[in-house]
Amino acid sequence: MGFEYGLLVVRLGLGLAIAAHGAQKLFGWFGGHGLAGTGGFFEAIGFRPGKPFAAIAGFGEGAGGLLIALGLFGPVGPALVLATMIVAAVAVHLKNGFWAANNGVELAYVYAFGALAIAFAGFGSLSLDTLLRITPTSPSAVYGVLAVGAIAGLLTLPLRRPAPQPAPVTSA
């Protein structure tokens, strides 16, 4: 009894928290800033135009978190979360150290490693994958999907560009 219920509790708790994080970006729910505010922040850290990057991040967190909570489509949800957490950790939080109290990487770390653990453990019998009889994923497929998520996150980082500098004023 314990293992399956334990997986369900972890999937629901972690997945819904991550999905809510995405809803803050996408819809401004739960005290978030929505696409406009989040897009402005993304522009400030070099992701231009900011709104599309904010939408992609919000989708990765929202859809990834919901897929984890529902136990649907194996490692796809964890890979979406992993991609967004790599970008968040490196682009926003790493310079502030580890602890979330200092805006460090702690939360991104917990979300990423929680998603990885769920991907490796599987969703268990109390999942939509089991209910819908979706074939369990082979270990190599899990590794492959997670690798795609990690690579997507890493390839997003070089897309940051510094803000355009105003032209110097010259006097005649």
Image (tube, rainbow, N blue to C red):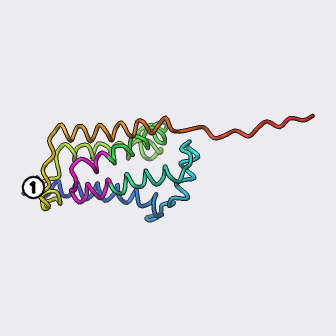
Question: Magenta stretch: residue 70 in it?
Answer: yes
Q: How many marks?
A: 1
Left/right of residue 37 with respect to residue 157 in the rendered view: right
Give the x, y percent position of residue 71: 21, 56
Percent x, y for residue 51?
53, 54
- The residue type indicated by label 1 comes to Gly
In this rendered view, identify the residue nearer to me: 89 or 100. 89
Q: Which residue is mark 1?
A: 2
| In this picture, residue 12 sits left or right of residue 105 | left
User: Which residue is nearer to you in this view: 63 or 41?
Assistant: 63
Residue occupying image coordinates x 17% and y 53%: 7
Q: Main secondary structure of the magenta part?
A: helix
Task: Determine the residue positioned at 14% across, 41% down.
Answer: 138
Counting from the top left corner in percent of width and height, residue 26 is at 45, 60
**In the rendered view, would you say 13 is above or below 162?**
below
Packing grade of label 1 (10 A; few <14, some 14-19, many >=20) is: few
Picture coordinates of residue 111 (x, y %)? 33, 47
Residue at position x 16%, y 54% from top? 6
Q: Residue at x 28, y 51 (%)?
A: 77
Q: Quadrant of the N terminus?
A: bottom left
Read off the magenta span.
64-79
Label 1 secondary element = helix
In the displayed orientation, state which residue is furthest to the left.
1
Look at the image and tell me in which quarter the C terminus lies: top right
Q: Answer with the quarter of the image where residue 59 lies.
A: bottom left
> Going by the picture, which residue comes out furthest to the right?
172
